């Protein structure tokens, strides 16, 4: 991967430490390397709470409840990405830190691990993977997620 331009906004109360941001940046870079992205990529990452992600989920997916992460890809699939010499905006990732914290507690691992998992999950969506299309794609996407997290040293 040539370079990751990561634009971060924290729109909720929990501070995102430099340590956590370092881990998130590492797994995003690892995911792009794993997927052989060979151009500079831009990703917008917003941290929100359940209320914020609920509003987005309702507006963009017509789902009236909070979720853990939303992905807004700029392209329908990896085949449509065109590199013209400038960094390519892959899309936006929105993570509910409130939901991630609850899931981390439920699964018995750290908030940092959960945020990293959600970031990897979402960047794969930005690259065109979709676990909701078929059982085969779900298995493939989740295997990729695990391998990327393992390569980055993020384990349960």
Image (tube, rainbow, N blue to C red):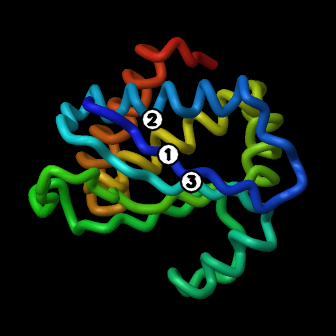
Label 2 residue SS? helix
Label 3: few (<14), some or many (≥20) within 10 Å? some
Which quadrant holds the C terminus? top right
Above or below 144: residue 82: below
Tell me whether circle 3 and circle 1 mark residues in contact (CB < 8 Å): yes
Label 3 residue SS? strand
Observer-nearest residue: 80 or 59? Answer: 80
Label 1 residue SS? strand
Q: In the rendered structure, find residue 6 and report the number of the disc placed on it.
A: 1
Which quadrant holds residue 3? top left
Find the distance from the CA under tag 2 to the CA under tag 3: 11 Å
Name which residue lies at 61% across and 26% down.
Answer: 22
Q: Position of residue 36 (x, y in %)?
A: 19, 31
Q: Position of residue 62 (x, y in %)?
A: 55, 87
Name which residue lies at 51% across and 81% down.
Answer: 61
Q: Is residue 39 left or right of residue 18?
A: left
**Front: mark 3 or 1:** 1
Q: Is residue 105 left or right of residue 91?
A: right
Residue linked to disc 3: 45
Observer-nearest residue: 38 or 143? Answer: 38
Residue linked to disc 2: 28
């Amino acid at each position: 991967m040539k370079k990751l331009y990561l634009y971060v906004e924290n729109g909720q109360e929990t501070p995102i430490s430099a340590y956590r941001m370092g881990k998130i940046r590492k797994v995003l870079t690892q995911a792009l390397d794993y997927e052989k992205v060979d151009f500079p990529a831009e990703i917008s990452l917003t941290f929100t709470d359940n209320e914020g992600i609920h509003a987005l989920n309702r507006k963009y997916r017509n789902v009236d409840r909070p979720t853990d992460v939303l992905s807004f890809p700029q392209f329908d699939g990896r085949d449509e990405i065109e590199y013209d010499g400038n960094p390519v905006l892959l899309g936006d990732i929105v993570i509910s830190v409130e939901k991630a914290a609850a899931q981390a507690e439920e699964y018995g691992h750290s908030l940092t691990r959960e945020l990293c998992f959600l970031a990897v999950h979402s960047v794969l969506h930005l690259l065109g993977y979709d676990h909701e299309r078929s059982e085969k794609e779900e298995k493939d996407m989740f295997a990729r997620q695990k391998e990327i997290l393992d390569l980055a040293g993020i384990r349960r």
